[in-house]
């Protein structure tokens, strides 16, 4: 398959990469923990029928050092709004996963005109003391793969150094992605999003891997209960936190059916 087209947008004086591939109505994707060091099969599945636009969040692979000037949650939300607008996604369908899912939900809540339909894959943003989330920032490096995916090799393939990558710079870039997520969501991914879920009126699909080791699958109902618009929950069998890596075809099919 062909490679995506790569462009950039400027946010707060820093460049963020934007990948575009496919044809049809626009669909934006905000990636999960670790970002997207490389294009993944899930995106190809979506690009069969949609123009898939994938901007990098600040600090993530392709997102440069823009996370260093984002000191508060509102800083992050406004930066994501700039990215969505400059990538041509205002008013389009929006899909977010994990870290990106928290920001996709914020876009739909605070800037409702920016999101036609919403799909969320195990988003951060909530915290339940009765069933606490795992802390991905407190894990040993060798434990992260099993935390992110039911099939640890899927995560390992995502973060493996691409051909030609600098052996010193690559680990720094991946550490930076974790740092950016921590700046946006620490502690424990809790942004008190429950206070804003009721503002979401866009039809919403909430997808959750049945083997999610980061956010308990019971959180899916908490999102559905809080969202004001029509909401559907779907469990993805055999998938972990980043379900789109474990089960790309199943997750893509569910998303596309919801957005049709």
Image (cartoon, rainbow, N blue to C red):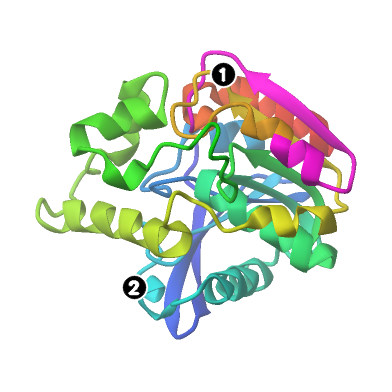
Q: Position of residue 232 (x, y in %)?
A: 81, 31
Question: Which quadrant would the C terminus be assigned to in this image?
Answer: top right
Helix, strand or loop for disc 1: loop
Q: Looking at this rendering, what residue extends furthest in the left direction? A: 168
Q: Position of residue 62 (x, y in %)?
A: 39, 61
Question: Image point 44% across, 27% down: which residue?
Answer: 213
Camera-side residue of 80 and 54 = 80
Question: Image point 49% across, 41% down: which residue?
Answer: 2
Q: Nearer the viewer, mark 2 or mark 1?
A: 1
81 left or right, relative to 61: right
Q: Which residue is mark 2?
A: 65
Q: Position of residue 66 (x, y in %)?
A: 40, 75
Q: Looking at this rendering, what residue extends furthest in the bottom direction? A: 13
195 left or right, relative to 97: right
Q: In the rendered image, is residue 49 in sight?
A: no
* Magenta-span inclusion, residue 240: yes
Q: Looking at this rendering, what residue extends furthest in the front direction? A: 130
Camera-side residue of 114 and 165 = 114
- In this rendering, is residue 30 above or below 78? above
Mark 2 closeness class: few <14, some 14–19, many ≥20 residues within 10 Å? some
- Identify the magenta region: 222-241
Residue 210's mark?
1
242 left or right, relative to 24: left
248 left or right, relative to 175: right
- In this rendering, is residue 20 above or below 132? below
Pick whichever of labels 2 and 1 is earlier in the sequence. 2
Residue 114's mark?
none
Camera-side residue of 14 and 127 = 127
User: For residue 161, which quarter of the picture?
Assistant: top left
């Amino acid at each position: 398959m062909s490679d995506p087209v790569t462009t950039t947008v400027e946010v707060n004086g820093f460049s963020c990469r934007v990948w575009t591939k496919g044809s049809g109505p626009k669909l934006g994707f905000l990636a999960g923990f670790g970002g997207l060091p490389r294009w993944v099969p899930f995106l190809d599945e979506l690009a069969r029928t949609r123009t898939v636009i994938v901007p990098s969040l600040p600090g993530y692979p392709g997102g440069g050092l823009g996370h260093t000037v984002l000191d508060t949650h509102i800083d992050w939300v406004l930066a994501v709004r700039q990215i969505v607008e400059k990538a041509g996604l205002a008013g389009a369908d929006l899909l977010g996963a994990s870290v990106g899912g928290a920001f996709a939900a914020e876009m739909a809540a605070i800037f409702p005109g920016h999101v036609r339909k919403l799909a969320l894959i195990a988003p951060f943003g909530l915290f339940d003391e009765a069933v606490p989330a795992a802390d991905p920032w407190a894990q040993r490096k060798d434990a992260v793969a099993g935390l992110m995916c039911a099939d640890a090799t899927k995560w390992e393939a995502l973060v493996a150094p691409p051909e030609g990558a600098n052996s010193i710079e690559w680990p720094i870039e991946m550490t930076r992605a974790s740092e950016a997520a921590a700046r946006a969501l620490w502690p424990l991914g809790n942004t008190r999003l429950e206070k804003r879920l009721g503002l979401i009126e866009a039809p919403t699909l909430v997808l959750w891997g049945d083997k999610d080791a980061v956010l308990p699958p019971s959180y899916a109902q908490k999102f559905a209960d809080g969202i004001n618009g029509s909401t559907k929950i779907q469990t993805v069998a055999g998938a972990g936190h980043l379900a789109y890596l474990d089960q790309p075809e199943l997750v893509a099919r569910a998303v596309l059916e919801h957005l049709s």
